[in-house]
Image (tube, rainbow, N blue to C red):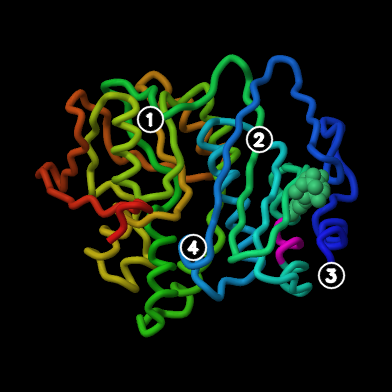
Amino acid sequence: MGEFDLIKRYFTPASYSADVLLGVGDDAAVLAVPPGYRLVMAVDTIVEGVHFPVGTSAADIAYRALAVNLSDMAAMGAQPRWFTLSLCLPDSNEQWLSEFARSLNQLAIRYGVQLVGGDTVKGPLNISIQISGLVGDDGWLTRSGARLGDMVFVSGVPGEAAGGLQLILNPQQQAEEKYRQHLLERFYRPTPRVELGVSLRKLASAAMDVSDGLLTDLRKLCASSRCGATMQLESLPASEALSNVFGESRAEELALQGGDDYELLFTVSDKNLEQLDSVIAATGVACTRIGQITDTLTVQCYRNGMPIEVKDAGFDHFNAG
Ligand code: ADP
Ligand code: MG
């Protein structure tokens, strides 16, 4: 199948909403940004053997490629609207492409984003998605807005995606089937917290999504906000699956240092705590208070009031190992 037919068959949406003035098929897309909104853009590339293990299904790869981008929109408080897809494929395997396209399309529909263009080339498997979203011109979330005394929250259960990855990388690891399934699901199908992010737009003082590890990412947020934080280890959301498969102590390490969760890490001032409760109730996404912003410029972990030194092992592409 040639490039033209491939794009036509798998990557040309049947219809668009009215804000897509020109979609797939021309030299570029043309989009209508409504008055009173700002355009928010992000791009994320995933590479076989780096961001997903060799052997990952086409459906899971497509899900992940789009989900990590949706998560970036969530972290800004933006509503995702449009994306372009750059596909680098070793060959044009029709079964792979149809599974990839079906999964991509399903997730796109669920989150109301539209594929408006892309590029298709031959080479080692990697997928790059550039996403755009809208945010009201009266404010968006950043990493730099945390202030002394704000409470630090995380959504969901950090560490489970990293637990899933451990199971994939170490097939001999024993795990009860229900826990194995749960952890693999968290790795292959992280839930982009879009609704939560949008609801936090006027409420959180700072936000980011957790991709490299909770501790590393909290350090990044603090560095951007020129502040520090405390983290209470006993407050970390408990994962029954992680403790069961890996034991309490390794479960805590995974929660602190494992990446790939795509949960939201955010800060909220005292006066907005009540409003946060309503958002949690409305979105149904559990958010746990794990610490507080300080003026120390470092992140200090405590267990039951005692300071604990945790080594920083978050993921860094150019500093791995
Ligand atoms: P050009 O010659 O301008 O680079 P291409 O032949 O690469 O154009 O692409 C033709 C059209 O198909 C363009 O509108 C482009 O955005 C779209 N396209 C190419 N690859 C993809 C893809 N993987 N997904 C979605 N749209 C794509
Ligand atoms: Mg091209």
* Mark nearer the viewer, 3 or 1: 3
Q: Is residue 199 left or right of residue 320?
A: right
| Residue shown at 70% from the left, 58% from the top | 121
* Mark nearer the viewer, 1 or 2: 2
Q: Are marks 3 and 1 in contact (CB under 8 Å)?
A: no
Residue 134 position (above or below residue 28): above
In the image, is residue 52 part of the stretch drawn in magenta? Answer: no
In the image, is residue 102 part of the stretch drawn in magenta? Answer: yes
Residue type at mark 3 is Met
Residue type at mark 2 is Ser
Give me the C-alpha separation between circle 2 and circle 3.
Answer: 30 Å
| Residue shown at 78% from the left, 30% from the top | 31
Residue 187, label in figure: 4
Give me the C-alpha separation between circle 2 and circle 4.
Answer: 24 Å
Highlighted magenta segment, given as a residue range: 100-104
Residue beneath disc 2: 132
Residue type at mark 4 is Phe
- Regarding mark 1 in the picture, which secondary structure is present there? strand
Decide: few, some or many residues near mark 1? Use Cα within 10 Å; few <14, some 14-19, many ≥20.
Answer: many
Residue beneath disc 1: 267
